Image (tube, rainbow, N blue to C red):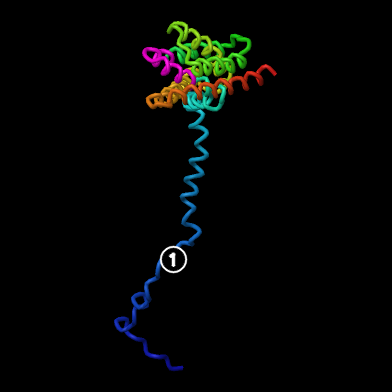
Amino acid sequence: MQLAPRTPPSLRPHARSLRAPRAPVPAPASASWIRPLLCVLLALASAPVLAHSAEGVAGGFVSGFLHPIAGWDHVIAMVAVGLWGAFLGMPAVWLLPVVFPLVMALGGALGVVGVPLPGVEVGIALSAVVLGAMVAFAARPPLWVAALIVGAFAIFHGHAHGTELPEAASPIAYSLGFVVATGLLHAAGIAFSLVTRWAQGRHLVRGAGGAIGALGAYFLVRALA
């Protein structure tokens, strides 16, 4: 058997050099979102841990801020305070919106510690009736009488906020939240009263006071039912 002559090594073709380079295998299209998804899942998994440490302060402030805004009986009474203060002029325009939150914070503290206050819902509804009537009839009592009326009703509003303090919330942050919301509602009433600069604006403000009083009477009937 005759063997074929061997090719010298120098003349052999280099197989590696003749092979075409391999193109990188592209990752499946469905795999491109896996890493972001894992990051999102990890973030969601760690969120409750982070939220648990902050819910006492942040959650308390948000809960307190939303509580007055969520109840129309609170909203109309607080707007009426701003309307009446602006209607009375200086210094009532700033004094009444200051007295109400300060006394309301005291009422909130009573509610937080569990001091009972009878007729809270009736007092809240009655505040809208009385304060709305003050605006509707353009009542101008002495400043100390107006402050006394506002402060007396503020206790009921504050007590209602305090008794509904969430268990996980910080009492201080919660109180700060509903005081800030109350101040903004007073400011809304003061801003609305600026229409008195026009000829028919005074009648419009008094009409708003009548509407607040009527809504207060509706809430009063519900509270007494």
Magenta region, residue range = 79-97
Q: In this view, does 12 lie above or below 151?
A: below
Pinpoint residue 149: horizontal percent, then vertical percent: 50, 9
Q: Does the magenta stretch include residue 73?
A: no
Classify residue 92 by image quadrant: top left
In this image, 87 relative to 117: left or right?
A: left
Residue at the right extreme of this rendering? 225
- The residue at which mark 1 appears reads as 25
Q: How many labels does the image show?
A: 1
Check the picture and name the quadrant holding the C terminus.
Answer: top right
Above or below, 219 against 7 in this view is above
- Residue 126 visible to an observer of this rendering: yes
Nearer to us in this view, 184 or 179? 184
- The image quarter containing residue 193 is top left
In this rendered view, identify the residue nearer to me: 168 or 27: 168
What is the three-letter code of the residue carrying label 1? Val
Most foreground residue, 49 or 6: 49
Residue 189 in percent (x, y) is at 45, 23
Q: Residue at x 48, y 7 (%)?
A: 148
- Name the secondary structure under disc 1: loop
Picture coordinates of residue 154, whole percent (x, y): 51, 13
Q: For the point 38% across and 15% down, which residue is it?
A: 89
Residue 80 falls inside the magenta stretch? yes
